[in-house]
Image: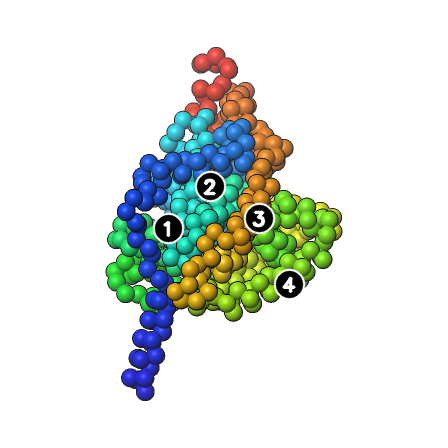
């Protein structure tokens, strides 16, 4: 019995290594895609495009919600080590805390720009990770490039999720999914992947939904590079446990409603196909008939794709689709957002868009792998076929349609410079030691010591 079990485990390991965790392709001679200058240029372009989505004024001259009130304020008030390992919303949030610490090091008037640029850089880095980590599963550069664009410019995201430190971990989660599938060719690549996974795990307990995938990766581990990837996931995921168990922060009471099923179809399925804006407009005009057609089309397309594709696509679909469903539904249930996020007849909005980012991208990933994989071993991949180009065109249309998320009334008022001057004036007129600098949206603000605000006051010194 023992020998037979060992044989089965070895056979499963071999099957996983061949199909679910294939070796990443090595760089070909003359390939400049990994040149440092090109990589840095693309990362900078990713940051620039994210700033443009929100608009220069909103992105560089305003702070959003927790970015100021929690993360910048925490950096001001606490020591570095105490701050970065402080919990928020019931769990560790390492990367947003680090962004807050960095923003606290620059002149106060530049804090919003620091938060925006650093948040955009983390999201762009997530896109870079997806490019390399998906290379063995999606060989078609058009499909893979589109997936990276969807990661960086997520069309299901609303203004709350763009250049915001509080929500960069959602983009990192998607990159981590692919990094768990990645078999890097170098130790340097494995070190990068491991650090990225660890940072993600210490920023968002949503990584627990990837535990089955990480378990399979551990079973298929062959060398120290694999162990680095799996070990970083295990350490980070386990570190969230005591943080959550011993946390005393008040939490939202979870609530299940049947609206959550509808929200999944609207925000994830519809959003994955058309993006937030075009998908929302389509819902306004066609309502439930649209969702039914999308659902049936997805089921039929999945059935045909799985029947004609390789075990790689079947494995990925078996992991990614349930993960997409469970992750979204648990998050919406846990935060009691079902009734708040559902689109009623004739309307659409973007509140809570961050919860749709990873689930929607997982569905898109399955579609891309199904299209890209060879139909039979030895057969040429579909390459730049009309199907792959058509899918890329539709997805890019969703990105373009949902690119602009500007809303100055919600995120843009008051400008940071004006808010600093108002707070400085309050310090002088009311003889305060600390004043709250208002931020977006209304009701949020950053308590700042009046000593740091003195340079923004118009009052004569010493009065």
Question: Residue 243, image x and y in percent?
Answer: 42, 55
Label 3, label 4: how far apart the Cα atoms are: 18 Å
Can you see residue 157?
no
Of residues 411 and 394, which is closer to you in this image? 394
Label 1, label 4: how far apart the Cα atoms are: 32 Å
Quadrant housing the N terminus: bottom left
- Colour convention of the picture: rainbow
**Badge 1 or badge 4: first in the primary sequence:** 1
Secondary element at image label 3 = helix
Please name the residue shown 60% across and 65% down the image. Answer: 300
**Badge 3 or badge 4: first in the primary sequence:** 4
Q: Within 10 Å of the Cα at label 4, are there few (<14), some (14-19), or many (20+) other Cα atoms?
A: few
**Badge 1 or badge 3: first in the primary sequence:** 1
Question: Residue 40, image x and y in percent?
Answer: 36, 37
Label 1, label 3: how far apart the Cα atoms are: 23 Å
Q: Within 10 Å of the Cα at label 2, are there few (<14), some (14-19), or many (20+) other Cα atoms?
A: many
**Badge 2 or badge 3: first in the primary sequence:** 2
**Badge 2 or badge 4: first in the primary sequence:** 2
Q: Which mark is residue 132?
A: 1
Which residue is denoted by mark 4 in the rendering?
A: 296
Labels 1 & 4 near each other (Cβ < 8 A): no
Labels 3 & 4 near each other (Cβ < 8 A): no
Please name the residue shown 63% across and 33% down the image. Answer: 409
**Badge 1 or badge 2: first in the primary sequence:** 1
Q: Which mark is residue 165?
A: 2
Please name the residue shown 51% across and 15% down the image. Answer: 458
Foreground mark, 1 or 2, reads 1
Of residues 204 and 313, which is closer to you in this image? 313
Please name the residue shown 43% across and 24% down the image. Answer: 451
Labels 2 & 4 near each other (Cβ < 8 A): no
Label 2, label 3: how far apart the Cα atoms are: 29 Å
């Amino acid at each position: 019995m023992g020998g037979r079990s060992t044989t089965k485990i070895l056979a499963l390991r071999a099957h996983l290594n061949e199909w679910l965790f294939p070796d990443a392709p090595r760089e070909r001679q003359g390939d400049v895609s990994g040149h440092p200058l090109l990589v840095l240029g693309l990362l900078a372009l990713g940051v620039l495009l994210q700033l443009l989505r929100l608009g220069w004024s909103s992105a560089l001259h305003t702070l959003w919600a927790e970015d100021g009130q929690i993360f910048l304020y925490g950096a001001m008030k606490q020591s570095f080590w105490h701050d970065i390992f402080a919990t928020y919303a019931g769990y560790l949030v390492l990367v947003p805390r680090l962004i807050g610490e960095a923003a606290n090091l620059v002149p106060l008037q530049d804090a919003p720009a620091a938060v925006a640029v650093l948040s955009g850089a983390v999201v762009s880095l997530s896109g870079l990770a997806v490019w390399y980590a998906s290379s063995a599963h999606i060989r078609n550069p058009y499909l893979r490039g589109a997936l990276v664009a969807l990661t960086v410019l997520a069309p299901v995201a609303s203004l709350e999720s763009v250049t915001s430190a509080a929500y960069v971990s959602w983009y990192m989660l998607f990159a981590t999914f692919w990094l768990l599938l990645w078999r890097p060719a170098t130790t340097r690549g494995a070190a990068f992947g491991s650090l990225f996974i660890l940072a993600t795990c210490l920023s968002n307990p949503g990584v627990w939904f990837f535990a089955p995938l990480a378990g399979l990766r551990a079973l298929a581990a062959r060398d120290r590079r694999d162990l680095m990837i799996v070990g970083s996931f295990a350490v980070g995921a386990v570190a969230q446990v005591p943080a959550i168990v011993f946390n005393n922060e008040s939490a939202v009471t979870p609530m299940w409603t049947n609206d959550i099923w509808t929200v999944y179809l609207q925000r994830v399925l519809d959003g994955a196909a058309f993006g937030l804006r075009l998908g929302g407009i389509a819902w306004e005009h066609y309502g439930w008939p649209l969702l039914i057609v999308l659902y049936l089309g997805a089921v039929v397309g999945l059935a045909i794709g799985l029947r004609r594709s390789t075990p790689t696509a079947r494995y990925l679909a078996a992991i990614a689709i349930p993960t997409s469903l469970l992750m979204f539904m648990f998050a919406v249930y846990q935060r009691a957002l079902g009734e708040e996020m559902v689109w009623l007849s004739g309307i659409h909005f973007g509140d809570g868009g961050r919860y749709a980012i990873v689930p929607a991208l997982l569905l898109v990933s399955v579609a891309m792998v199904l299209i890209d994989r060879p139909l039979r071993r030895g057969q040429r991949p579909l390459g730049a076929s009309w199907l792959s180009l058509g899918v890329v065109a539709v997805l890019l249309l969703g990105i373009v349609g949902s690119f602009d998320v500007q809303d100055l009334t919600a995120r843009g008022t008051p400008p940071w410079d004006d808010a600093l001057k108002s707070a400085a004036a309050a310090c002088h007129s009311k003889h305060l030691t600390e004043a709250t600098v208002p931020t977006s949206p209304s009701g949020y603000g950053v308590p700042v010591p009046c000593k740091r605000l003195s340079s923004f006051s118009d009052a004569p010194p010493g009065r």
